[in-house]
Amino acid sequence: MNRSSHRTPNRQPSRPPNRPTQRGVRAFRKYMLFFLLATGTIGAYLWIAYRTPLAEALANTAADPRTFLSEADVARAASYSMLRDLLFFVGYFWEWGMLLWLMTSGYARTLSQGLKGLIGSVWLRFPAYIAGIAAALFALGLPLRLLSYSISRNYDVSTLSFGGWWRDQWVQLAVDYALMLAVGAVVFALARKGGTWWFRLWLLSIPFLVFLMFIRPVAIDPLFTKYERLSDPALEHAVLEMTAKAGVPAERVFEANYSKKTNAINAYVDGIGPSLRIVIWDTALHKLTAEEIVVLTAHEVGHYVKKHLQWSAAGGVASMFFLLWIGNKAYRFALKRWRSFLFIRHPADWPGLPLMLLVVSVLTFVTTPLTSAVSRNAELEADRYAYALTGDADAAVTMYQKLAASSRGTLYPPALTYWFRYTHPSLGDRITEALDYDRTLP
Ligand SMILES: [Zn+2]
């Protein structure tokens, strides 16, 4: 292309090459090095951190896992937690690698150009382009998801059969595709007009966030699980007695069938308007006593009373503003910086999609410690509410011990994973808190 070795960095080739460029390949190799170093460093950190012995003051208290788990189970919980923590970080690094590969290999560019020759109508071509990107991400992410599933199976946390897992993968792909298509269409349509398109995108995102937080639990989640009215009337009565004391409008308690998928214990409260729905996972019904289930649901009622869902929706809208504002800046910066191998002339060119996803993923990752800290605060508030409402912190202590056993979670996570992964206080902290709770309703 160049007759002399003199470079003209400001000029872009009129037709981008369909094969990966030297610079793209080099950028991807550099990233691979980062991937290995970061994974190794975090792996070593976790390996050392999970071998730190328990603080003397906690030994032989209810917050000491050796008082309610066997030595073997304590060790198993530690190794499982370590693997999960590592998978959390590797999951992000892997995702960034996949997206970089879509760009540096020329996949996104070739796909976009190839479809131009095949499909005339943009209304058909765009869904086809998104399908090509979604399929590539699905395939490239499969090894890691398979690893994650097999680890959960190995530690008896997941009870999902391979067939069930495989089916869920396809359902997830369909949901992801629909989401990417809808959001992508809006993003590209707005970006094409230029100006402060990110601001208009933010305005449009508000109803979307409301959908995700208030409607998805009711409309989408049942696609994955079966719900029915709680079969134990005495338990329903006890739960409704608690909700009446809290002064919240609940008429029914539901059970959701999660035992085909997991051994983890959970419950939640959802619904807006005159009546709310209390949903208890059947795993909780199998493993917890009635008193423990009342505390578990009282915690969820605490979220409702303290309006945590509304607060988190407001927080979501505010953080979306910053995400889009900074994201737009970062996207433009990266387009300029990497133009030697991206060949994206306009921010609204379709091959820019993997870069947009990369920017969103990186920003999500770096803000996770903040959002986790906010969430932990709300969880602590809901815990305190539950203890004061039920006056039964003893049931809370035994419940946390059972949660630890069933989730194979560690009671005392290392600081790094605590900042990133813990949207709830650690079970060790929750037990300590319950042992010394305040009797007045917060
Ligand atoms: Zn909670």
Image: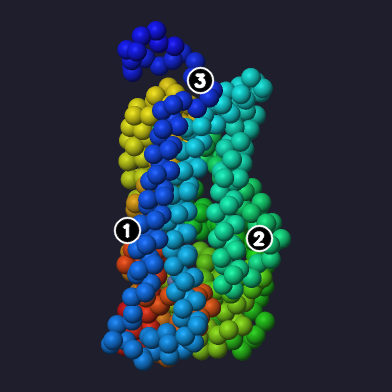
Q: Which callout, 1 or 2, points to the residue nearer the camera?
A: 2
Left or right: 202 with respect to 276?
A: left
Name the residue at 40% across, 16% down.
Answer: 12
Q: Position of residue 72 (x, y in %)?
A: 50, 83
Quadrant occupied by the N terminus: top left
* Residue 288 seen from this side: yes
Q: Residues within 10 Å of mark 2 (few under 14, many from 20)?
A: some
Q: Which residue is the site of mark 3?
A: 17
Structural distance between the alpha carbons of marks 3 and 2: 40 Å
Name the residue at 60% across, 63% down.
Answer: 150
Q: Position of residue 131 (x, y in %)?
A: 62, 37
**Quick one: which residue is furthest to the right in this view?**
163
Q: Does residue 10 lie above or below 376 as drawn?
A: above
Q: Quadrant of residue 46?
A: bottom left
Q: What's the residue type where badge 3 is placed?
A: Pro
Structural distance between the alpha carbons of marks 3 and 1: 42 Å
Tell me which label, 3 or 2, sits earlier in the chain: 3
Q: Which residue is the site of mark 2?
A: 165
Left or right: 262 with respect to 393?
A: right
Q: Residues within 10 Å of mark 1 (few under 14, many from 20)?
A: few
Cβ of mark 2 under 8 Å from ligand 1: the answer is no
Q: Secondary structure at mark 1?
A: helix
Q: Quadrant of residue 128?
A: top right
Q: What's the residue type where badge 1 is placed?
A: Leu
Q: Does residue 99 lie above or below 49 as drawn?
A: above
Tell me which label, 3 or 1, sits earlier in the chain: 3
Q: Nearer the viewer, residue 368 or 14?
A: 14
Q: Which mark is residue 180?
A: none
Q: How is the image coloured?
A: rainbow
